[in-house]
Image (cartoon, rainbow, N blue to C red):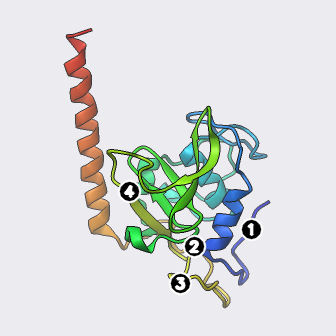
């Protein structure tokens, strides 16, 4: 059920976290699209796409508006360079924030736990944030339009998402692109190195 933000709706991080928790136990499929009814298996990023883009009508990375689940949508790497969220420190993570690594992402339900679509065996479940993706860098993000404090937003349009194409975190986006490029090079080098041995 969509929680449309227009018309003066109130939104806080708890609303996002609570909505995400309703999908606990949902099946996982790599590159899966949730489908129009949201009942098809998904992966970590299509789960976040469903919650943010479908349930809350946020514009997703790449300016994708009106996400309906018929396709996978933006990947984890797209979120790393997305102008629709601000980077925050690990200590400032709160319910509704995005926990984004290079190859995984989830939605924080508090400062220590998140819900994410993990793998075919575990599906969508709650897990600890710290230590989840060993060897990768956690880049926590707060979606623009979500208040910095725990209090819900009030007023007429403060809950809308102004993020379709805006970018105020240019230096972080550049860092994310460098990290993305380095990962591609490392993967390519490891495949080349294994090519002669197999």
On the question of residue 147 being in view, the answer is yes
* Mark found first going from the N terminus, 4 or 1: 1
Name the residue carrying label 4.
138
* Mark found first going from the N terminus, 3 or 4: 4
Q: Residue at x 24, y 17 (%)?
A: 194
**What is the CA distance from the residue labelled 3 to the residue labelled 4?**
21 Å
Name the residue carrying label 3.
149
Name the residue carrying label 1.
3
**For discs 2 and 1, the disc positioned in front in the rendered view:** 1
Residue 59, located in which quarter of the rendered image?
Answer: bottom right
Whether 85 is drawn above or below 179: the answer is below
Do the numbered discs 4 and 1 sit on residues whose CB atoms are within 8 Å? no
**Mark 1 nearby-residue class (10 Å; few <14, some 14–19, many ≥20):** some
Q: Residue at x 71, y 44 (%)?
A: 25
Q: Position of residue 23 (x, y in %)?
A: 72, 51
* Mark found first going from the N terminus, 2 or 4: 4
Q: Which mark is residue 99?
A: none
**For discs 3 and 2, the disc positioned in front in the rendered view:** 3
**For discs 2 and 4, the disc positioned in front in the rendered view:** 4
| 154 and 5: which is toward the camera | 154
* Mark found first going from the N terminus, 3 or 1: 1
């Amino acid at each position: 059920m969509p929680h449309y933000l227009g018309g003066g709706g109130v939104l806080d991080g708890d609303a996002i976290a609570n909505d995400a928790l309703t999908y606990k136990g949902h099946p996982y499929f790599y590159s899966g699209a949730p489908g129009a009814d949201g009942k098809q298996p998904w992966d970590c990023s299509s789960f976040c796409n469903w919650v943010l883009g479908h349930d809350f009508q946020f514009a997703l990375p790449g300016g994708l508006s009106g996400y309906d689940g018929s396709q996978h949508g933006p990947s984890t790497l797209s979120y790393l360079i997305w102008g629709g969220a601000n980077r925050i420190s690990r200590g400032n993570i709160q319910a509704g924030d995005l926990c984004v690594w290079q190859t995984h992402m989830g939605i924080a339900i508090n400062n220590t736990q998140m819900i994410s679509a993990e793998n075919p065996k575990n599906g969508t479940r709650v897990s600890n944030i710290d230590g989840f993706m060993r060897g990768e860098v956690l880049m926590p993000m707060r979606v623009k339009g979500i208040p910095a404090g725990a209090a819900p937003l009030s007023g007429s349009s403060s809950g809308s998402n102004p993020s379709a194409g805006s970018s105020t975190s240019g230096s972080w986006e550049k860092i994310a692109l460098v990290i993305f490029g380095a990962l591609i090079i490392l993967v390519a080098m490891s495949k080349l190195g294994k090519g002669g041995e197999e």
